[in-house]
Amino acid sequence: MGTGSIIVRMLSVFLAVLLIGPQGISAQSGGEDKPFKQEELEQMLAPIALYPDSLLAQIFMASTYPLEVVQARRWVKANQKLVGEALTKALEKENWDPSVKSLVNFPQVLDMMNEKLDWTQKLGDAFLAQQKDVMDTVQKLRAKAQEEGNLKSTEEQKVIVEKGTETIVIESSNPQVVYVPAYNPTVVYGAWPYPAYPPYYYYPPGYAAGTALFSIGVGVAVGAAWGYAWGHCGWGHGEVDIDVNRNTNINTNIDRSKYQNKVTSGQGGRGSWQHNPEHRKGVSYRDQASAQRFDRAPSRDAQSREAFRGRAEAGRQDLAGTGQAGGRQDLQGRGETGSLERGAAQQRRGDGSGDLAAAQQRSSPNAFSGYEKGSQTGNFSARGHQSMSSSRAGGFGGGMSRGGGRGGGGRR
């Protein structure tokens, strides 16, 4: 081969490398800003779709501020002795989004969102990009559970089917007490239609796997923090609605005027919920559309992660057929965890609160690792109910078949 031919081939390789370099990645990333698939939405919403509407709305909004969730969880653990007036005054001093503050009433929910931080961030990303799709998916899952005979009114909660729209509303029987259910998504919704996307599940600490399919835990008496629970599910238009003046009788220490123009798109503190990027605190957005919408350009790392998702997606379906679908999800989890760490690094240049998320991620680098692997699905199925009983408290996972037992959860 002549010298001229060698040079030509080297130039060709060099040009190819340039095309798939940062510019190529950015171009590909722009084409990969796709919404979550329906199977992904059902997978991530399965463990919370049967929560009471009032609590579900707070989780949706708070999930868009993952770093503040970490801060709130640690604050709760450090201030367990605060009650009454002291608690209300201390909480008002914290500069978190009201939805995050409202979850102070539910330490176990904060624990779930904190321990499974990549799931929290993914849920928030979905809610920002596809709010109506998320709301519609909750209704779809509730309808499935009801068809299976697993969603009914009880002494603790009311299940209401609105005439005409067939919308399913879940409310606490006593508005002053909110009950958080525990259930096995692989059973309560019937046969799961997406083998490659097994539903996540969560057993809070204190729950023991038993024989109950759907278990209502001990009620949580709403307190001062619930005065920040202004959002409620607007199922008719697929949004969370806000009324800043709600719950005034629960917490009179709230300066509501400072929130009116930041949490709602309406006037006078009423209207559709709007995301406040100030509370995002440096955590990058998943897609270009969300980043542009909130005037926060995604980092190059985030773009590279989106490009990787595009390349991995083609191989994921093939892997799913061989029982290895979880591989892509593990890699994706590590990518999303990395984005949160990058946001935390930015915070260290500010108020230092980023250290919270960074430390949290070091202790739990991938919350779903070891649960989503398709190769483990068969093992879970074979172990059946014994596997359910032995799964560790507080675990989040997926891939258990219907043969995995009808032991969705015990009491708190």
Image (cartoon, rainbow, N blue to C red):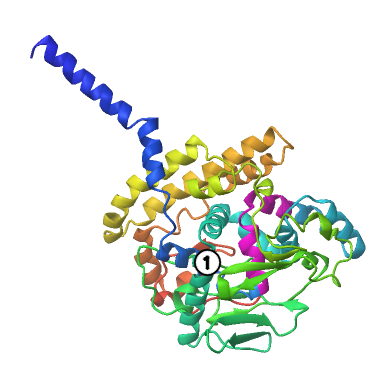
Let me know if residue 237 appears in the view. yes
Q: Nearer the viewer, residue 193 or 300?
A: 300
Crowdedness near tag 1: few (<14), some (14–19) or many (≥20) residues, C-alpha within 10 Å: some
| Quarter location, residue 87 | bottom right
Look at the picture and state if 279 lies above or below 56: above
Query: Which percent across, then down, holds residue 71?
Result: 71, 50
Q: Residue furthest left?
A: 1
Query: What residue sits right under mark 1 in the picture?
Result: 132
Span highlighted in magenta in the image: 54-74
| Quarter location, residue 295 | top right
In the image, taking residue 255 as reference, residue 298 lies left or right, namely: left
Query: Which percent across, then down, holds residue 268?
Result: 78, 63
Which residue corresponds to the image point at 62% horizontal and 80% vertical from the top-left?
Answer: 170
Counting every numbered tag in the picture gives 1
| 60 part of magenta stretch | yes
Label 1 sits on what residue type? Answer: Lys
Q: Residue furthest top?
A: 3
| Quarter location, residue 59 | bottom right
Let me know if residue 389 appears in the view. no
Q: Nearer the viewer, residue 337 or 158?
A: 158
Query: Which percent across, then down, holds residue 382?
Result: 36, 71
Query: Which percent across, then down, holds residue 108?
Result: 68, 64
In the image, taking residue 355 as reference, residue 183 lies left or right, namely: left
| 111 part of magenta stretch | no
Element under disc 1: helix
Quadrant of the drawing holding the N terminus: top left
Q: Main secondary structure of the magenta part?
A: helix
Look at the picture and state if 121 lies above or below 213: above
Quadrant of the drawing holding the C terminus: bottom right
